[in-house]
Image (cartoon, rainbow, N blue to C red):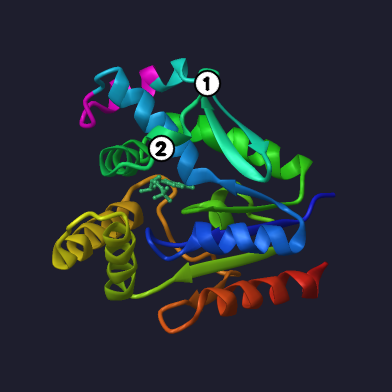
Amino acid sequence: MSFNVAIDGPAGAGKSTIAKKVAKELGFIYVDTGAMYRAMALFLLKNNVDQEDKEAIGTKCQEADISIRYENGEQIVLLNGENVNGFIRTEEVGNMASVSSANPKLREKLVELQKKLAAETDVIMDGRDIGTCVLPNADVKVYLTASSKVRAMRRFKELEAKGLTCDLAQIEADIIERDNRDMTREHSPLKQAEDAQLVDSSDMTIDEVVEAICSLARAKM
Ligand code: DC
């Protein structure tokens, strides 16, 4: 039986940074489910699907084949066979992913792939509904969060390091809007699973969070 670690939490909580490090420590595969929703969003944008048109999203997503492969421990997302890692990290794709991921048909397709991966391999998987829907029997469940102020500041610094000028208040407003959309949608909203451990990283270093999650996992292995 494979060992599964589920990490859920809002945008910018540091899930992927932490999960990658935990995966390395434990020798697990890191599955970034947000990247799959982003690849699907990219497909919809490329095909000019209107984000308000729920029926078109449900139909069109059936034409997208999303799969993943690993190269030197890095997850490569393939959209109809093409590596799209370089195209899915934009704000436009992120916003489309946040809207289109509310669609139950689209979710069904990706959740099936996620369950299959976790059944075959020891994984640490992050997203919004991993502990609640995708892996309800995960060995370890963590709900990783941080205040919207801290998350906005982290994003601000990331953008600044790339030489981009940005408005901190606007970033925080976008984060709050995204949280609200992810938490209030009808299907698989973001919420802490009853048996998940809450980790608030607002005042923790990355290494402290990694250690906390590795300890939870080691205690169950
Ligand atoms: O984690 P991220 O920012 O890459 O995710 C992009 C969007 O995908 C996010 O706004 C909500 C959606 N998502 C989801 O609905 N369920 C998941 N398991 C992962 C992401």
The residue range painted magenta reads: 50-60
Q: Secondary structure at mark 2?
A: helix
| Residue closer to the observer: 26 or 193 | 26
Say left or right for 115 vs 166. right
Residue at the location (53% across, 34% down)?
110
Residue at the location (15% across, 67% down)?
169
The total of numbered circles placed on residues is 2
Q: Which mark is residue 65?
A: 1
Is residue 99 visible from the viewing direction of this image?
yes
Earlier along the polypeptide chain: callout 1 or callout 2?
A: 2
On the image, the x and y values in percent for residue 180 come to 27, 58
In the depicted structure, whether residue 164 falls above or below residue 207: above
Residue at the location (50% across, 79% down)?
205
Q: Which residue is mark 2?
A: 38
Q: Secondary structure at mark 1?
A: loop
In the depicted structure, whether residue 145 falls above or below residue 173: below
Name the kind of residue labelled 2 in the image: Arg
> Taken as a whole, is the magenta stretch helix, strand or loop?
helix
On the image, the x and y values in percent for residue 133 come to 55, 50
Name the kind of residue labelled 1 in the image: Asp
Tell me if the residue at label 2 has its CB under 8 Å from ligand 1: yes
Q: Quadrant of residue 168?
A: bottom left
How crowded is the residue under tag 1: few (<14 C-alpha within 10 Å), some, or many (20+)?
some
| Residue closer to the observer: 22 or 219 | 22
| Residue closer to the observer: 67 or 108 | 67
Say left or right for 28 vs 213. right
Residue at the location (69% across, 71% down)?
214
| Residue closer to the observer: 34 or 106 | 34
